[in-house]
Image (cartoon, rainbow, N blue to C red):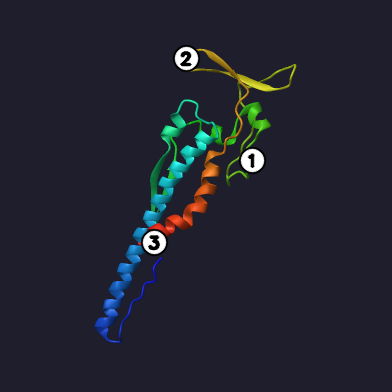
Amino acid sequence: MAKKTLKADLSISSIRNLQKELEKYRNSLTYKARLLAEKLSERGVEIARVQIADLDAIFTGELIQSLHSEYKASMPYGAIFAVVTDSKHCAFVEFGTGQRGEDKPYPYPLPEGVSWDYNVGKTIRQNATTGRYYWFYPGQDGKWHYTEGMPSRPFMYLTSMELIREVPKIAKEVFGK
């Protein structure tokens, strides 16, 4: 960010003018902090879409299409924006499910407050010969499909790591103006 210099002499009018300039500067920082949060979330959506494709996690296209940037809340000197999906199966993609998820589990520390277990649920069965877990589910085609689940495809974790690396560049773009 460019260096900001404010000058004043010791007169009352000069001090009042300095107060106005400081308030204007503070407001510009608040605006830029909000803009930074918004730009980071928009960039996060782009990165997440690439991660989903790179991790071969496109099944119906619903997950990748539902990703969007969303304003969440105002803060005293900024705002909160988030990368959001309306997909009900995004956690299954991120953390994996069933036997395949257990074979290739989520490789990173779980986020605070999140617990994840594989091979749990009322419809899961265990093959008596192989010991592997499986279940059947109704497809959109009206048929029943067999699955052992899916491996973890941590697209949001990888998105967050890449976005962290990009913060300095995006901050310079926003605050350098």
Query: Which label was assigned to residue 175?
Result: 3
Answer yes or no: is residue 107 visible.
yes
Quadrant that contains the N terminus: bottom left
Residue 154 coordinates in the image, percent (x, y)? 57, 38
Residue at the spot of label 1: 107
Crowd rating for badge 2 (residues with CA inside 10 Å; few <14, some 14–19, many 20+): few
Residue 101 coordinates in the image, percent (x, y)? 63, 31
> How far apart, in angstroms, are the residues tagged by discs 2 and 1?
33 Å
Quadrant that contains the C terminus: bottom left
User: Where is residue 110, by image quadrant?
Assistant: top right
As drawn, 148 above or below 17: above
Q: Pick whichever of labels 2 and 1 is earlier in the sequence.
A: 1
SS under mark 3: helix
Q: Are marks 2 and 3 in contact (CB under 8 Å)?
A: no
57 or 129: nearer the viewer: 57
SS under mark 1: loop
For image coordinates 66% across by 27% down, the residue present is 99
User: Of the residues shown, which amino acid type is indicated by label 1?
Assistant: Pro
User: Of the residues shown, which amino acid type is indicated by label 2?
Assistant: Asp
Q: Pick whichever of labels 1 and 3 is earlier in the sequence.
A: 1
Crowd rating for badge 1 (residues with CA inside 10 Å; few <14, some 14–19, many 20+): few
> How far apart, in angstroms, are the residues tagged by discs 2 and 3?
52 Å
Residue at the spot of label 2: 141
User: Of the residues shown, which amino acid type is indicated by label 3?
Assistant: Phe
As drawn, 90 above or below 47: above
